Amino acid sequence: MLELDIFQREIMIGGHLEQSFGSCGTDSALVGAKLQVQKLSPAMELKLGLEIIETVLSGRPDSGKERKRMKIGGKYFFKMKDDPNKY
């Protein structure tokens, strides 16, 4: 179990959605919004389940490329680089 205390969060205020081009994540982009930092008092507690790290094939099935992945809070996260400074 990963337990986090969150003391602040960033939210986007305002703006509007426009069609996005060249994005593989979504077909729209938020334009004209302003970033706002909200302090949280008391801190928000967040508990996330952790599962073991596993090695899986990545990319095309015939590529033979392997990546490590771990499930945190029900979502998969992949290790993409060995050097943490390159993220």
Image (tube, rainbow, N blue to C red):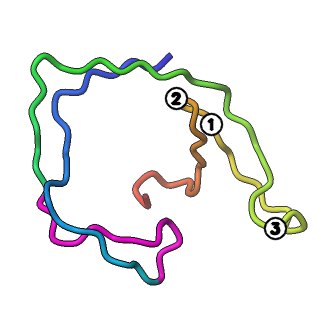
Amino acid of disc 2: Gly
| Gap in angstroms between the C-alphas marked 3 and 1 | 20 Å
Point out the stretch of residues depicted in magenta: 22-34
> In x, y percent, where is residue 61?
87, 63
Nearer to us in this view, 54 or 47: 47
Pick the residue in front: 68 or 38: 38
- Point out the tag, 3 or 1, that comes first from the N-terminus: 3
The disc at residue 57 is none
Magenta stretch mostly in which secondary structure?
loop
Look at 64% across and 25% down and name the residue there.
Answer: 51
Circle 3 SS class: loop
Instruction: Report the number of numbered marks.
Output: 3
Residue of label 1: 70
Q: Pointers 3 and 1 in contact (CB under 8 A)? A: no
Q: Residue at x 44, y 83 (%)?
A: 21
Mark 2 neighbour class, 10 Å CA radius: few under 14, some 14 to 19, many 20 or more: some
Would you say 46 lies left or right of 15 here?
right
Q: Earlier in the sequence, mark 2 or mark 3?
A: 3
Q: Are marks 2 and 1 in contact (CB under 8 Å)?
A: no
Q: Where residue 7 sits: x, y (%)?
A: 17, 27
**Foreground of the two, 10 or 53:** 10
Amino acid marked by disc 1: Met
Q: CA distance from mark 2 to mark 3?
A: 27 Å
* Quarter placement of the C terminus: bottom left
* Residue at the (31%, 76%) spot, across then down: 18
Residue 37 locus on image (x, y percent): 11, 44
